[in-house]
């Protein structure tokens, strides 16, 4: 379930796991659903906690449902338990636009 959290973010609970790739990914079909219904941005941008970095996230086949797979180096710095769902913020479209314009996220795939 995704719910409005603030004027800048939605809140959802998903699994966060380490991944051998070089960018964060979620299931490609779920990415499209989130994009259509909530964010309308590419990439989607997630944030795990107040004060943490924004994580540009792309759709990819083969990622488990409702799972954010992040590069191993990033995962180690997040202080999350991969066996438990984690509260995650999804940036709203206006927020993503602001982050990009301020160069606070690198959205080049």
Image: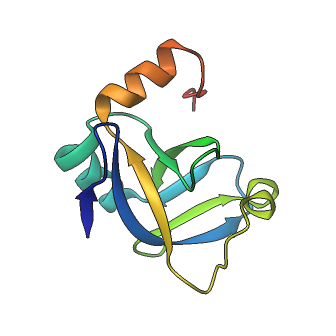
Q: Residue at x 31, y 52 (%)?
A: 5
Q: Residue at x 71, y 47 (%)?
A: 22
Along the viewing direction, whichever of 29 and 40 lies nearer the viewer: 40
Residue at the limit of the structure toward the top, as seen here? 101
Quadrant in the rendering for residue 98:
top left
- In the rendered structure, the answer to whether residue 50 lies left or right of residue 30 reads right
Where does the image place residue 109, in percent across and percent down from the top left? 57, 32
- In this rendering, the count of numbered labels is 0
Q: How is the image coloured?
A: rainbow
Where does the image place residue 57, in percent across and percent down from the top left? 51, 46
Let me know if residue 95 appears in the view.
yes
Q: Is residue 52 above or below residue 105?
A: below
Where does the image place residue 107, in percent across and percent down from the top left? 54, 28
- In the rendered structure, the answer to whether residue 54 lies left or right of residue 59 reads right
Quadrant in the rendering for residue 7:
top left
Q: Is residue 102 above or below residue 30?
A: above
Let me know if residue 62 appears in the view.
no
> In which quadrant of the rendered image does the N terminus lie?
bottom left
Q: Is residue 13 above or below residue 44?
A: below
Q: Residue at x 78, y 61 (%)?
A: 72
Q: Residue at x 79, y 58 (%)?
A: 77
Quadrant in the rendering for residue 14:
bottom left
Where does the image place residue 9, in percent across and percent down from the top left? 35, 44
């Amino acid at each position: 379930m995704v719910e409005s959290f603030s004027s800048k973010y939605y809140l959802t609970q998903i699994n966060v796991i380490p991944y051998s790739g070089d960018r964060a990914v979620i299931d490609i079909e779920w990415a499209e659903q989130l994009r259509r219904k909530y964010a309308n941005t590419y990439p989607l941008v997630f944030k795990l906690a107040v004060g943490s970095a924004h994580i540009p996230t792309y759709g990819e086949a083969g990622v488990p449902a409702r799972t954010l797979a992040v590069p191993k180096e990033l995962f180690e710095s997040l202080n999350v338990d991969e066996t438990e769902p984690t509260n995650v913020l999804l940036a709203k479209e206006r927020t993503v636009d602001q982050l990009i314009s301020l160069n606070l996220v690198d959205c080049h795939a």
